[in-house]
Image: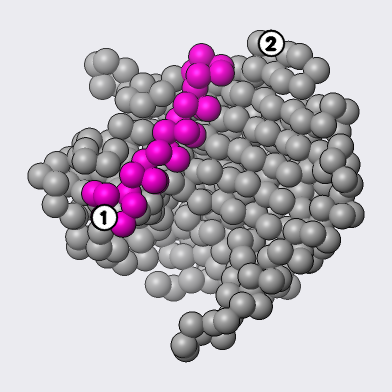
Amino acid sequence: MGKVVCPWDLITNFVTDAFVGYGIPEEDAKICTDILLESDRRGIESHGCNRFKPIYLDRIKAGIQNPVTNFEIVKETPTTAVVDGHNGMGQVIGYKSMQMAIDKAKKYGMGMVAVRNSCHYGIAGYYTTMATKQGCIGMTGTNARPSVAPTFGVEGMFGTNPLTIGIPTDEAFDFNIDCATSITQNGKIEYYERIGEDVHPGTIIGRDGKPIEGDSGVALKKIRDGQAALATLGGIGEELGGYKGFGYAMVIELLSAVLQDGSYGKDLNGKDENGNIRPYHLGHFFIAIDTDHFLGEELTRKKAGEIIRSVRNSEKAPGCDRIYTAGEKEWDIWQERKDSGVPINESVQQEILAVRDELGLTQYKFPWE
């Protein structure tokens, strides 16, 4: 679909300047840019440049997301905190909250921060990587606009609710599992629509209880209109364990709301009672566990490495020559891309040019021009 590789320094500087142009303070803009592009570094293009304009810039312009983040600590103890993000930049709120949890863990062994009134915080695995780089086990989760149906239901009642855990290892990359508790997520379907790929069978259920297939754009509109919903991990019904994905999704929904008295479910749909758009009021949680408060970072990394290598070295299925553990494929993609740049599809190319022209950032020239 006409992808063009854009060098990292060029896209980094442009995205940062564009965020500043939309009113985000420079230091916060750098955080937002780093988290946004980390998705592309890992090959998770649904959450990178693909979402730069529609999820962040457009929401700032619409007045439902604040470019200047008011990071309010509502309550704090030596090991915990409750934060109100006042609908600021989710990446800034997430970055500060995770670092707060890590700092508490370094001092007391464990730390947890619960957040309310935030916005989309980007790739969840960024925050767990913050923890593993500092010798901690990290965990985070977030609720999201309701688009996923419970087992035996057809109505979107909760979000794609990622469950994300990072554990330090002695390898070049840490163990980092970052995935939604639904089979697929809205961002992936948005990405499929951009590249002209159909919905994958069994991932979306209609209000008639039947799977939705075909055009991704049509499916996405049905989800937005409440006429379809995503299926949880395990799929539609119980036969392949859909109730397990449902259960884990509810864990994230609860932890993203109950400790901080946050919004949940249909209150996260971004609309008021009259159908007018409003902030999403998302909730997050961040947990850090310092390995030095147990038997030490060095031993933790060595033991974790031994465990994942034992799994990767087990017998392979016929026709398969490699077993991957969480974080490995993303590391491989970074090795492929680090000296070149981020591949950007045609629709995002046009969005970038439009933002450049809107802000008068005429110093930027892109490879696809």
- Displayed quadrant of residue 91: top right
Residue 108 x, y percent position in the rendering: 84, 27
Residue 136 x, y percent position in the rendering: 78, 43
Pick out the residue farthest to the bottom: 319
Q: Residue at x 47, y 33 (%)?
A: 251
Give the numbered dot on residue 239: 1
Pick out the residue farthest to the top: 75
Side of 277 where 171 appears, left or right:
right
**Up-down relation of residue 273 to residue 221 (above or below):** above
Q: Nearer the viewer, residue 362 or 246?
A: 246
Q: Residue at x 38, y 51 (%)?
A: 233
Residue 71 x, y percent position in the rendering: 67, 20
- Look at the image and give the residue range highlighted in magenta: 237-262
Residue type highlighted by circle 1: Glu
Residue type highlighted by circle 2: Lys
Residue placed under numbered mark 2 in the picture: 75
Say whether residue 260 is magenta: yes
- Quadrant in the picture for the N terminus: bottom left
- Displayed quadrant of residue 27: top right
- Displayed quadrant of residue 28: top right
Side of 193 where 295 appears, left or right:
right
